[in-house]
Image: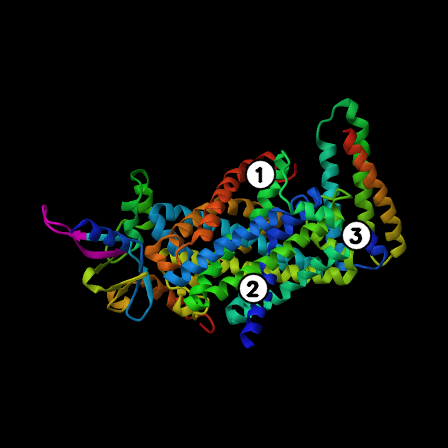
Amino acid sequence: MGGDRMDLVYRVLDDQLVDVDGRRCGRVDDLEFEGDLGEPPRVSAILSGSGVWHRRMPRRLRAIGARLFGSGVVGRDVIRVPWTQVEDISSVIQLKSKARELGLAQGDDRDATFVAKLPRS
Amino acid sequence: MKKIFQVALGIIAAIGGFVDIGELVFNTQAGAVYRYQLLWAVPVGVIGIVVFAEMTGRVATVSGRPVFDVVRMRMGLNVGLVTLVASLLINLVTLAAEVGGAAIVLQLLFDVNVSTLILVAVVGLVLIVYFVPFGGIERIFGYLGCALLVYVAAAVHLRPDWHQVAQGLVPSWHSSALYAYFVVGVIGAALIPYEVYFYSSGAIEDRWTLRDLSLNRANSVLGFTLGGILSVALIVVAGEVFFAPKVQPGYLGTTALGAQHAYGEAGLLLALLGMLFAVGGAAVECAFSGAYTLAQFAGWEWGKYRRPREAPRFTLAWLIFFALAFVIVETGVDPVLLTEYAVILSVVALPLTYLPVLLVARDRTFMGERANGLLANTFGWLYFAILLVVSLAAIPLMLVTDGGAG
Amino acid sequence: MAGDLARGRTKTTFVRVHGAELSAQAEHEAEKLNDDPVAPELKMPIEEAIKLAADIGGAIDDMRVSPQDREQARQDEVKLRHWAGRADRLAETL
């Protein structure tokens, strides 16, 4: 992967994810690359969830970061979204499927059941 | 014709919504201690908020990114997290100050025990926000906040020495830490960050297009400028009423006394009514700004027009902010003190959100041909320098002057 | 506030609430002056300052108790102005 494409990929980092229904469902918190040694790396997946934050923090703060934000348990504090799910990249990352199908926005779905009990919600 | 009417209404709402408890406290004190010599700091602050708001509005319209999206994207996770935490804490202190201020004004009107009134204020605000559509909320608080225009009338009525007032509008310098503290305070009270974050999120929710850009820009310039006139009036009235007798205003009641001095009971009632709605409206903006900040940084669904169950974490966020503010104010801490901390700390953190917005506003890859031109760049960088200086000086000055006690 | 009360230009609730804030502060200042250790040559002015604070607080409390008594308010206005001037001069000497 050449230099510009790497920049493009890094431009995607920290961007907003939006599902096929236009629902905001998290951010690109980290990226997963694949490729054998000697080959140019390819992006294989988007990682979304605070569980990967600790890896990006300064080394001394990683332990605290993992405790506060999660240690990266896939399915719980981080969701893996295959790169093939990406429909378009503009000011947001447009995804092809619904957030629920991809496992995203679980926090909103979970809290929605509580909020739905409030009047006129 | 209808559009002009709408614009005019929008500007009126902006005037009433410009003043919050920071200006009520700092401008009254500035006028009481230094008479008209700090008047120049108000335009410095107003131009600052116009520059900041213009950039955030333009960035939101062109790139679809509100402030905390810009912060996260441009500054990355780590600096972004620091900015987030700082902003949320400051937001909470500010919200507590506004809520406490509203409770005090209610007490001055109704002489009921303040603990009860704090509950009334919080519950009232939450219910209004929850059940009234947002367009209506902004109009109610904005129009009724215009009762504060009694201060503009009072400023003229009290017949100040206009020559001295004009002189006060020209920047002057006193080598006194107290003076410098008030310069920081008056600028900080005008350059309200949560108002800018709220404004940028609003631009996206109201779906501003490139075509509306100049109209919205004119709208905000006019609104903030006229609001600034209100701030100037607060200083002039305080200068007329409190400077000679050497009153050091430490209470909102003292601020209200200024209007009463000019117009008696009618003046008092208009001032208190205006304060209540200006501060109440500020509380709503503040709580939502905090929710926007958190939701935008984390990537959650957000929106003041959304039904609660469509943006559950966003909804819970602003509800919890109000609850926390309630707890803080009920501990009995003085809202005027909270205000001073809120304004000073806001000023300290301001460069953290201003810089990413400036960098993105200048960046053609995001803004295309709407990137900063010469004027925007000049003012943009000039104000970054001003904000940096003010931000670095703020806490030392607060400590040295013991919070403006001299 | 006294002046406005004397001329009937204010609200009772305002006088009661804001007056309470001001008189509480006067009392607080008096207590601080009383409790802090003081150099012997300053003893007289400090005692006068304490008495002033007490007088001021008392006048404000009178207004709070009977805000409709305009005559009292008129007299309080005169007294308060006098005491404010005295406090100013005291502050300058201290």
Please name the amino acid that badge 3 sits on.
Met
- Residue at which label 3 appears: C1
Residue that appears at 48% across and 64% down: B214
Mark with earlier residue (2, 1)? 2
User: Spatial distance from mark 2 to mark 1, Cα to Cα?
Assistant: 32 Å
- Residue at which label 2 appears: B125
Tell me where the magenta segment starts and ends, as one range: A33-48
Task: Label 3: state its secondary structure.
Answer: loop
Q: Categorize mark 2 by other alpha carbons within 10 Å: few (<14), some (14-19), many (20+).
A: some
Judged by depth in the image, the label closer to the viewer, 2 or 3, is: 3
User: Spatial distance from mark 2 to mark 3, Cα to Cα?
Assistant: 31 Å
Image coordinates for residue B393, horizontal then vertical, percent: 53, 38
Judged by depth in the image, the label closer to the viewer, 2 or 1, is: 1
Q: Is residue B117 above or below residue C47?
A: below
The residue sitting at the bottom extreme is: B2
Q: Magenta stretch containing residue A43, yes or no?
A: yes
Image coordinates for residue A46, horizontal then vertical, percent: 23, 57
Q: Is residue C40 above or below residue C57?
A: above
Check the image and tell me how it is coloured.
Answer: rainbow
Please name the amino acid that badge 2 sits on.
Leu
Q: Is residue B305 visible?
A: yes
Q: Categorize mark 1 by other alpha carbons within 10 Å: few (<14), some (14-19), many (20+).
A: many
The subunit letter for the residue under badge 2 reads B
Q: Which mark is residue B398?
A: 1
Residues B265 and B59: in front is B59
Q: Are marks 2 and 1 on the same chain?
A: yes
Is B326 left, or right, of C22 in this rendering? left
The residue sitting at the front extreme is: B374
Image coordinates for residue B371, horizontal then vertical, percent: 39, 56
